[in-house]
Amino acid sequence: MKEACLYEKLDFGRVHCHLCAHQCRIEPGKFGLCAVRQNIDGVLYSRVYGKPAALHVDPIEKKPLYHFLPGSRSFSLATRGCNFRCGFCQNWEISQFSAADEDPGLPTVSPQEIVRLAKRGACASISYTYTEPTIFFEYAYDIAKLAKPQGIKNVFVTNGYMSRDCLAAAKDYLDAANVDLKFFRQESYRRVCAGSLQPVLDTIGLMHEFGVWVEVTTLIIPGENDSDQELADIAGFIAGVNVNIPWHISRFHPDYRFTEQSATPVETIKKAQQIGAAAGLKFVYAGNVSGFGSDTLCPSCGKLLIKREGFSILENKLKDGACGYCSKRLAGIF
């Protein structure tokens, strides 16, 4: 275990965790809502530090990040746990977990070893992904501090529910993030995720303000967030932060507690793309579909710049981050 950061001690052995927007006040012996940070005798500990539940080398496009080092590899890791309870989670086996039931056989991997593995895999970045990186922030932070001086960039794939204090602590080491904007209705966030909308919106704005490259993903679930109005609200919010923020619209497939739901019709994905374009967004991508929606076009001359198939890049016409035809610089980190 490692003592947690971003908390304060209260009376009667209680602690107040400031890591995420839940702002948990935790009694002695109890866990926060993330189920991996525990108050032991008035001291808050991370119970997952150095205990990755997943380690992989992925294409950066899988995060998904399309305007951040395209074609590169990212060393990806996660611990168990999450501060949301999304009924449609695709990684629920490791995210919906309590450290009280922790597997004692889970190997310990130091931050130094993570960086070594990333270098050995010729990875341009390390992605904290699969579950929610906020809940293993101490581990991610220590890795990021080691990776950055060695030229390895750091990526959060996140639900955006970290506190401002957490993001301020991370910003000097965090290069890019993909933030899930799951709904644009408070009631939906509360009912489906056990969270709130506004902190996620605040995080997207703060990341952009802090100079972190941001892309946004929305998983479109039939009957939950697929109305024209909600999609327009999401697109309008993103455009209000910056029209160059890529919006990834992903097709839902039944999983976890949402097995009775139907998969998202392809027509809905195409409709959402049109709504995003109408809101002024320059880059709207379709995910979990094939045959359309993944290519990058120059917003100035309209020429095809990056042609993708799945997570692979088939063509790249960028030259030093600019359009190879009209020389207009493309928004992103290349």
Image (cartoon, rainbow, N blue to C red):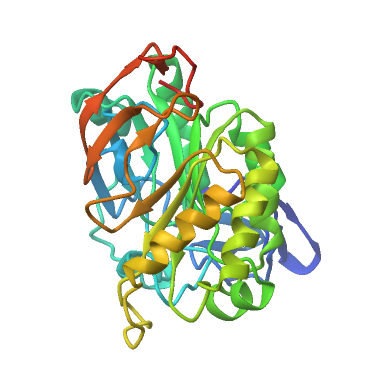
Q: Residue at x 77, y 69 (%)?
A: 12
Q: Residue at x 47, y 40 (%)?
A: 283
Please tell me whether residue 60 is drawn above or below residue 264 in the rendered image.
above
- Seen as rendered, the residue at the extreme right is 11
Can residue 109 be seen in the rendering of this structure? Answer: no
Q: From the viewer's perspective, is 262 left or right of 249?
A: left
Q: Which residue is drawn at 35% across and 29% down?
A: 125
Quarter assignment of residue 13: bottom right
Q: Residue at x 64, y 70 (%)?
A: 28
Residue 142 drawn at (x, y percent): 47, 33
Residue 196 drawn at (x, y percent): 66, 67
Please tell me whether residue 119 is drawn above or below residue 58 in the rendered image.
above
Quarter assignment of residue 315: top left
Q: From the viewer's perspective, is 34 left or right of 294?
A: right
Image mark count: 0
Please tell me whether residue 56 is drawn above or below residue 154 in the rendered image.
below
Q: Quadrant of the C terminus?
A: top left
Q: Nearer the viewer, residue 331 or 327?
A: 327
Can residue 287 be seen in the rendering of this structure? Answer: yes
Q: From the viewer's perspective, is 79 left or right of 38?
A: left
Residue 197 drawn at (x, y percent): 66, 64
Please tell me whether residue 211 is drawn above or below residue 230 in the rendered image.
above
